[in-house]
Amino acid sequence: MNQLFPHVDWMGMLTATGQTLYMTLVSGVFTFIFGVILGLVLFLTAKGGLYENAITYRITSSFVNIFRAIPFIILIILLIPLTVLIIGTMIGASAALPSIIIGASPFFARLVEIGLHEVDKGVIEASQSMGATRFQIIWKVLLPESLPSIISGMTVTLIALIGNTAMAGVVGAGGLGTLAYNDGFEANNNDVTFVATIIILVIVFIIQFIGDIIARRVDKR
């Protein structure tokens, strides 16, 4: 192994992998929470929604569109003051979390909104005719019915998060991105970059595999 990859520090690679998984999973949890909330607000306040409100919809939609449009590497730089305020530093895996979460949540929110729009309106109308409250419709109809789409959207988002952690690594967030850039690209050690890339691909395949299984199991249609 050392002959094939002479420049790879395997303990360092293991540490970097742990940092990448940490950034992906922690940001994934918060992205899921904020994304579902934003997606619900977009769906419920849109025209014909249960809480139709044009002003709220436009404000939320504008927020989502703006942060979806900003390239992630620029977003990291723009959010440095906020990162320092929350985390106390702009370097390290934890420091990358605010930017990753803020960058990914609007993307996931649109996927949630799309999933909610796929729910059969007849099911919603039937629930209303049976006297269900709006909260009951959201909790017992909309979310369960759209759950397969939401899970699929979260799978796509988690894979995008891995790409974001790699980009964050270029500016000192740690993880496989930092290792591939500093020890691989800048030091001209192609074997380091190659191994880091392979590990990222393996993580992506595992996430996609697990996400597909969960989406199939929650799909009752």
Image (cartoon, rainbow, N blue to C red):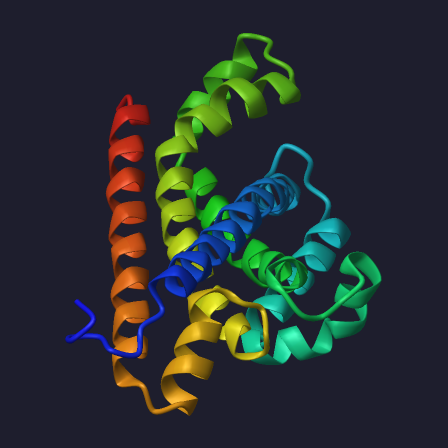
In the figure, 164 relative to 123: above or below? below
Residue drawn at point x = 51 percent, y = 50 percent: 22
Q: Is residue 31 left or right of residue 121?
A: right
Q: Is residue 109 left or right of residue 205?
A: right
Q: Quadrant of the C terminus?
A: top left
> Considering depth in this image, is 38 or 52 the residue closer to the camera?
38
Write down the quadrant of residue 196 in the picture: bottom left
Most extreme residue toward the right, as rendered?
85
Position in image of residue 148 (x %, y %): 35, 34
Position in image of residue 113 (x %, y %): 50, 46
What number of labels is visible? Answer: 0
Residue drawn at point x = 29 percent, y = 61 percent: 199
Q: Quadrant of the N terminus?
A: bottom left
> Considering depth in this image, is 204 or 67 the residue closer to the camera?
204
> Considering depth in this image, is 170 or 102 the residue closer to the camera?
170
Position in image of residue 82 (x %, y %): 79, 66
In the figure, 3 relative to 208: above or below? below
Position in image of residue 211 (x %, y %): 31, 40
Residue drawn at point x = 71 percent, y = 70 percent: 90
Residue drawn at point x = 58 percent, y = 54 percent: 105
Write down the quadrant of residue 179 in the picture: bottom left
Q: Is residue 190 left or right of residue 64?
A: left
> Considering depth in this image, is 218 or 48 the residue closer to the camera?
218
